[in-house]
Image (cartoon, rainbow, N blue to C red):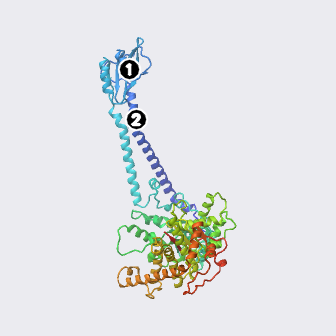
């Protein structure tokens, strides 16, 4: 690994030192101006005026009307209340009075014990005219202290000067931002990033980015991606081995996958395994409203990466700047396109001695510009999908290893119940379970916390305080029992894991079905899912007749969506094989055929649910009654109540199911999955 020597950075030391000194001087100047402005404003309101007036009140003024007070036999200045001063004036003991309108004070002399004494008294603001009239009526010699205009304007001048200086600094900072460098005091205060230090990946200008502590051992469930990047780690560790053989490793690796699958974690692990600095930034941080800022930041980022020798540059959410360019110029896209152009130039212009590799992450590779994906740039794409069952189990083992988990928790069982979860989803699940354990004042995570955490992550926290009418609970119990029994009795439907009438989120009750990692969906499986979705309405019809409720609205939406995909995408409807674009289903003959085919699938599914539940009304009532008592029934208890096979009418043949209770429902299991969920609104 190549590191930066002291001599390599000597040429840039004076410039950075001078810039730092200039910034410190500007910061101190701004602070001084701000403090001075605040002080001046306060001086205008109170301090400055009082100080000037008080000083003038103690200094005789040439040319003031009335005789100057005698200083013979004068003692210390006495502070008198205004009422006492007026009383003395009525008795003729006050000799002189000098009013200061700037400080609302009156000073002078009065007779006491045969001598003259000086006094000072304060009067209310605006009372000066009336006080003057009263003193003149009592034959007191009255004079006024003139205000000093020059001193009163001094604080105002200071404030105006400070404001002008502040405006000048703001204009200077704005010009520097247009030039692509806002690494000044204003850039730091405003939270924007510097071109020389984008995304704040270093503590300061010119400082080396640290090697991340993440390793491949911290990554689970991404075996293929780790294997693909292992050669990159070897290249970063021993670049001379590849250079001697004349082998060039791809300069750019594009990590493609859904959100939360660990793309950033994988990039950090590559840098940690290779022991090289990790320069990470979000693509959106390159672009700002000023044209040229993004390009300058791209240049600065790659300059710093080259200075480090071997390094990893990671750009998250690449599609923010990497969208395909169009021949039609769109206002506001100039900055993004100039940033993209600079990124293309930097990636294709590496020096042969520089071991800098670019990793980028996106979940929208289809919208990226073709120039980014050509050889020499991001010429290798690495899939980072959601983990399969084995991957989820390894991720759960990794998270459980860092926490205190009870021995009865089975990661393999939980991995089967969390089909479709990403690594971030699993992390959130375990963390939610830990929070629930803390609320219950436990120091260990048990299966009950994981069950509740899974339900909370999938549907939100239970609304246990919700006030539900007795009739609504009864309808919900029948509705959910219909979903559960049809799912249990149909051969190609998934067995329900648990049924609950506890409100969660927007649903009044929920029937949980396990997910699966199957790549394909057969027609029988799809039609079974439709029947399970329509079973809630079928159960309501048995309870309420033709006065059913709107509780099946969300079921109809999910069933219609699946039926439309069966017709327009999967070729499973009466229209036969073929693909119909969404815009073709709005109006026209083809749209009418699509809607008719979808309606046929939905009616067949509702008829199938009715045929299963009609002869089993007693079983349906039994399950609904148990739900009203216990509010939640797991799969084992449901199987004990309903049995594997449904009651059959004399004109119908039984539909056998494969599997046994021991195989389908492990003992003590009530953990639900995020996959198909049927609920009542």
Picture quadrant where residue 578 is located = bottom left
Q: Residue furthest bottom?
A: 576
Element carrying mark 2: loop
Which numbered disc, 2 or 1, marks the residue closer to the eye?
A: 1
**In the rendered view, does 647 fall on the left or right side of 177?**
right
The residue carrying mark 1 is 85
Question: Dot 2: few (<14), some (14–19), or many (≥20) neighbours within 10 Å?
Answer: few
Residue shown at 41% from the left, 23% from the top:
81
Question: Dot 1: few (<14), some (14–19), or many (≥20) neighbours within 10 Å?
Answer: some
Q: Nearer the viewer, residue 90 or 625?
A: 625
Element carrying mark 1: helix
Q: Residue furthest right?
A: 407
Residue 357 seen by the camera = no
Residue at mark 2 to residue at mark 1: CA–CA distance:
25 Å
Image spot of residue 547 (x, y percent): 45, 72
Which image quadrant: the N terminus?
A: bottom right
Image spot of residue 596 (x, y percent): 41, 83
Image spot of residue 355 (x, y percent): 56, 71
**In the rendered view, does 114 fall on the left or right side of 404?**
left
Q: Nearer the viewer, residue 394 or 76?
A: 394
Residue 46, numbered circle: 2
């Amino acid at each position: 690994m190549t590191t930066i020597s002291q001599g390599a950075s000597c040429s840039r030391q004076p410039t950075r030192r001078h810039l730092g000194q200039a910034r410190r001087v500007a910061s101190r100047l701004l602070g001084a101006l701000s403090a001075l402005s605040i002080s001046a404003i306060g001086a205008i309101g109170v301090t400055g005026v009082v100080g000037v007036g008080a000083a003038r009140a103690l200094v005789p003024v040439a040319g003031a009307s009335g005789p100057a007070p005698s200083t013979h036999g004068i003692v210390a200045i006495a502070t008198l209340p205004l009422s006492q001063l007026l009383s003395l004036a009525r008795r003729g003991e006050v000799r002189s009075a000098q009013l200061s309108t700037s400080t609302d004070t009156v000073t002078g002399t009065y007779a006491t014990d045969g001598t003259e004494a000086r006094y000072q008294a304060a009067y209310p603001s605006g009372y000066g005219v009336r006080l003057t009239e009263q003193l003149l009526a009592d034959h007191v010699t009255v004079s006024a202290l003139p205000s000093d205009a020059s001193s009163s304007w001094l604080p105002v001048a200071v404030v105006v000067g400070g404001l002008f200086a502040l405006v000048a600094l703001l204009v200077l900072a704005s010009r520097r931002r247009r030039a692509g460098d806002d690494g000044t005091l204003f850039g730091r205060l405003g939270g924007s990033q510097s071109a020389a230090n984008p995304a704040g990946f270093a503590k300061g200008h010119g400082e080396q980015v640290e090697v991340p502590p993440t390793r491949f051992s911290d990554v689970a469930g991404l075996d293929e991606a780790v294997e693909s990047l292992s050669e990159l780690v070897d290249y970063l560790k021993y670049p001379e081995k590849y250079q001697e053989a004349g082998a060039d490793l791809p300069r750019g690796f594009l990590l493609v996958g859904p959100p939360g699958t660990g793309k950033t974690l994988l990039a950090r692990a590559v840098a940690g395994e290779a022991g090289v600095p990790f320069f990470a930034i979000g693509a959106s941080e390159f672009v700002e409203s000023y044209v040229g800022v993004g390009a300058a930041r791209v240049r600065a980022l790659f300059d710093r990466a080259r200075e480090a020798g071997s390094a990893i540059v990671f750009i998250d959410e690449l599609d923010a700047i990497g969208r395909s360019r169009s021949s039609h110029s769109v206002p506001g896209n100039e900055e993004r396109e100039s940033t993209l152009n600079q990124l293309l130039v930097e990636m294709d212009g590496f020096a042969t001695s520089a071991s800098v590799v670019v990793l980028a992450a996106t979940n929208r590779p289809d919208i990226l510009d073709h120039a980014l994906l050509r050889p020499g740039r991001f010429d290798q794409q690495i899939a980072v999908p959601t983990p399969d069952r084995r991957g989820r189990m390894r991720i759960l083992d990794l998270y459980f290893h860092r926490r205190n988990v009870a021995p009865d928790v089975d990661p393999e069982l939980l991995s089967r119940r969390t089909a479709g979860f990403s690594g971030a989803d699993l992390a959130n699940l375990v963390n939610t379970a830990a929070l629930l354990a803390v609320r219950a004042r436990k120091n260990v995570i048990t299966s009950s916390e994981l069950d509740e955490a899974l339900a909370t992550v999938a549907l939100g926290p239970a609304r246990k305080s919700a006030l539900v009418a007795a009739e609504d609970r009864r309808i919900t119990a029948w509705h959910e029992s219909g979903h559960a029994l049809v799912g249990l009795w149909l051969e190609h439907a998934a067995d329900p894991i648990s049924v609950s009438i506890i409100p969660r989120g927007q649903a009044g009750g929920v029937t949980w079905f396990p997910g699966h990692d199957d790549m394909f969906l057969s027609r029988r499986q799809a039609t079974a899912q439709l029947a399970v979705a329509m079973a809630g309405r079928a159960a309501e019809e048995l309870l309420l007749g033709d006065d059913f409720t709107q509780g099946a609205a969300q079921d109809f939406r999910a069933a219609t969506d699946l039926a439309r995909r069966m017709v327009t995408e999967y070729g499973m409807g009466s229209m036969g094989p073929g693909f119909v674009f969404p815009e073709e289903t709005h109006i026209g003959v083809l749209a009418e055929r699509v809607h008719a085919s979808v309606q046929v699938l939905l009616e067949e599914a509702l008829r199938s649910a009715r045929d299963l539940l009609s002869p089993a009304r007693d079983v349906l009532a039994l399950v609904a009654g148990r739900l009203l008592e216990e509010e939640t029934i797991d799969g084992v208890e449901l199987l004990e109540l309903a049995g594997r096979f449904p009651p059959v009418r004399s004109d119908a043949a039984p539909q056998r199911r494969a599997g046994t209770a021991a195989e389908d429902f492990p003992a003590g299991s009530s953990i639900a999955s995020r996959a198909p969920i049927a609920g009542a609104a």
